Amino acid sequence: MSSRPFCELEDLWENGYFHYIRSLRTLATSPEEACSLYGHFNVAYELWYEVRGGVHLVESPKHRLSPAHVTLISELAAALAELPPEAISFTDVAQESLRRLKHPSWVRPRALAARLLLQLGHVTSSNLAYINSPKAI
């Protein structure tokens, strides 16, 4: 199996994208599934924080996102920025995490996440190939 030459900027982008997609997938699921995937601890805040961070992916010179992807990522980040405090505040209680994710203000971000996942299909496939490939350091 051949190795690819290592590029730090590319590696940073690919790893950031990989974790962003994990968070998007979780956000796009039901509140119950999201809580289960994140271990019921402070789930709403963690998803809010991680998915909003996706805007930093477009700042890399190594990003492979189309203008349409960039627009959707920005739209999702803006929708998350509008969530009220009661939908994202800290909790270490499982039922409170679930209650926060069931807040009606999460409906739009959840739908946008699902839409974005579909749009990013080919980028995600390429990312998985990169993540699973040997890298020469």
Image (cartoon, grey):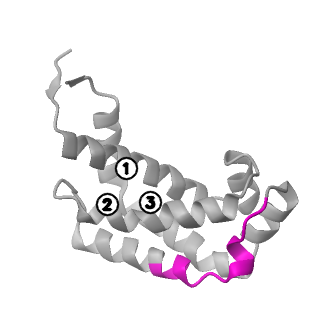
Q: Name the image quarter holding residue 132.
A: top left
Tell us which disc is closer to us: 1 or 3.
1
Give the magenta part as a residue range: 78-91
On residue 117, the disc is: 3
Residue ID for mark 1: 16
| Element under disc 1 | helix
Look at the picture and state if 136 lies above or below 91: above
Residue 88, magenta (yes or no): yes
88 left or right of 10 in image: right
Tag 1: amino acid: Gly
**Crowd rating for badge 1 (residues with CA inside 10 Å; few <14, some 14–19, many 20+):** some
Pointers 3 and 2 in contact (C-beta within 8 Å): no
Pointers 2 and 1 in contact (C-beta within 8 Å): yes
Residue drawn at the location 37% of the way across and 49% of the way down: 16
Looking at the figure, which quarter contains the N terminus?
top left
Q: Nearer the viewer, residue 121 or 128?
A: 128
Q: CA distance from mark 1 to mark 3?
A: 15 Å
Label 2 vs 1, first from the N-terminus: 1
On residue 57, the disc is: 2
Q: CA distance from mark 3 to mark 2?
A: 15 Å
